[in-house]
Image: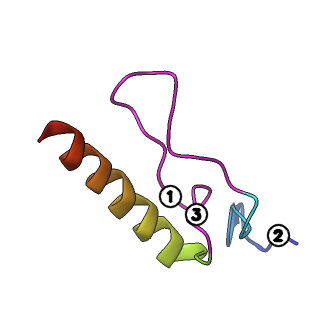
Amino acid sequence: MRSFRKDWPGFRGRPGHGFGPETSVNGLFNVGDSVNPPTFYGVSGAAESARDVARKIVSSSS
């Protein structure tokens, strides 16, 4: 089920139906509502996906 407010969906992704942060471009990652870690969705899922990618970047540069 998707919820729309005017032209924008309320939530783009659904728990368990997103995609991963990796892309085919080196150093470019997906984050946001459609890249939810398990058990997260919406704003908290978007923030948690950004934290996961930030941790990945920091750990790979060390």
Residue 56 in picture, x, y percent from top left: 31, 48
Residue 2 is tagged as: 2
Q: Secondary structure at mark 2?
A: loop
**Label whose residue precedes the other's in the sequence (2 or 1):** 2
- In depth, the one of 21 and 13 nearer the eye is 21
Q: Quadrant of residue 9?
A: bottom right
**Does residue 32 appear to the left or right of 17 in the view shown?**
left
SS for dot 3:
loop
**Category of crowding for the residue at label 3, using alpha-carbon neighbours closer than 10 angstroms: few (below 14), some (14–19), many (at least 20):** many
Q: Residue 3: give x, y in percent of width and height.
A: 79, 74
Q: Residue at x 19, y 48 (%)?
A: 58
Amino acid type indicated by mark 3: Asn
Residue 13 locus on image (x, y percent) = 70, 62
* Residues drawn in magenta: 18-38
Residue 17 is one of the magenta-drawn residues:
no
Which residue in the protein does label 1 denote?
Answer: 32
Give the number of the mark in front: 3 or 2: 3
Point 57% across, 62% down: residue? 33
Label 2 is placed on what type of residue? Arg
